[in-house]
Amino acid sequence: MEKSNWFAETLQRIFSSKRIKITLYITAVLWLSVITQILVNRFFFRNFQFAEAFVKTSTEDVECSLEIVAQHNNDFLSEADKKDIFRYIADVIGLKIDKDIEIKKDKDRTEYVYQKQAKKAVTSLKIVSMEQEVDSAIKLKHYIIVRLRIKDSIQSLEKYRKLLDDAFEKLGIKQKQVTVQYEGYITKQMTKENKEETARQLVKELQGEIAFDYWQNDTYTVYAYTGLIDEYIESAGCKINIQIAMTYDTQTEKTKIYLASPIINQDW
């Protein structure tokens, strides 16, 4: 009888232990699923949400652009080094270098420039070397600048961003300034109310909040912040990583809409 009780108690402990392990396992799997979904959602946002939000504005003649500016870690880069960097970046994004790289020199500044224009894309690669005073000594600082401008195929912009992110990582460059921008036309003159509502909807789509906005003549500008994007700048004590602008072109009789992160990097 004692053996029977001992055996029953042993089985109970074993099954109780298994239940605990199973419960812990299921809990861990559920939490892993939640964390994975959060990461997937975050990745999805970074790669697609900007394009998706802009598409909903129903603009025409849509163009998008990507600019990456980064400082190279080495103080010395030879001409061969710079051309190797050009070729490497070009290979990564599928760009064929089929003409000489232009070299411009001006006092304490040297630029290596390569630009190529296709039917629906313009690509510009540049390395700028500048003399700067550091600790009472003159040193060279080298900046790599990549600009892509793509017409119509706005969904492909993030593909190139990912390729370039990996390329800069392999070059040993982690710190860089990235600007993404979308622009298009509405074939009418939007009212003040239409512009304000469009801006609010864009910020809502990007899960952000408006920091401040203002009117200048017929141009409406909005600065906003979303916590789903790591990069931001600070202006007037506010975090900013979204800028929206809408302006009417009297010559074309169209309203142009811009959406950029963190801010618009060209004249508008």
Image (tube, rainbow, N blue to C red):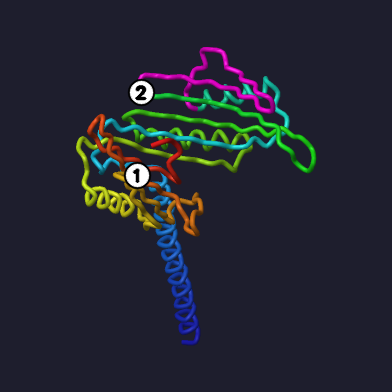
Position of the C terminus by quadrant: top left
Q: Is residue 147 left or right of residue 63?
A: right
- Please determine whether, in this image, residue 241 is positioned above or below residue 117: below
- Please determine whether, in this image, residue 3 is positioned above or below residue 144: below
Identify the disc placed on residue 120: 2
Q: Is residue 108 left or right of residue 67?
A: right
Name the residue tied to disc 1.
245
Between 87 and 206, the one lying in front of the other is: 206
Q: Is residue 153 left or right of residue 143?
A: left
Specify the amino acid type for callout 1: Ala
Q: Residue at x 58, y 23 (%)?
A: 86
* N-terminal label among 2 and 1: 2
Using the rendered view, name the quadrant where residue 110 is placed.
top right
Determine crowd level at label 1: few under 14, some 14-19, many 20+ residues with C-alpha closer than 10 A: many
Between 119 and 200, the one lying in front of the other is: 200
Using the rendered view, name the quadrant where residue 70 is placed.
top right
Stretch of the chain drawn in magenta? 93-119
> Magenta includes 181?
no
Q: Give the Cα separation between the discs numbered 2 and 1.
A: 24 Å
Under circle 2, the secondary element is loop
Under circle 1, the secondary element is strand
* Percent x, y of residue 3: 50, 83
Q: Residue at x 68, y 34 (%)?
A: 141
* Percent x, y of residue 66: 45, 35
Specify the amino acid type for callout 2: Lys
Q: Residue at x 30, y 35 (%)?
A: 184
Most distant residue in the bottom direction = 1
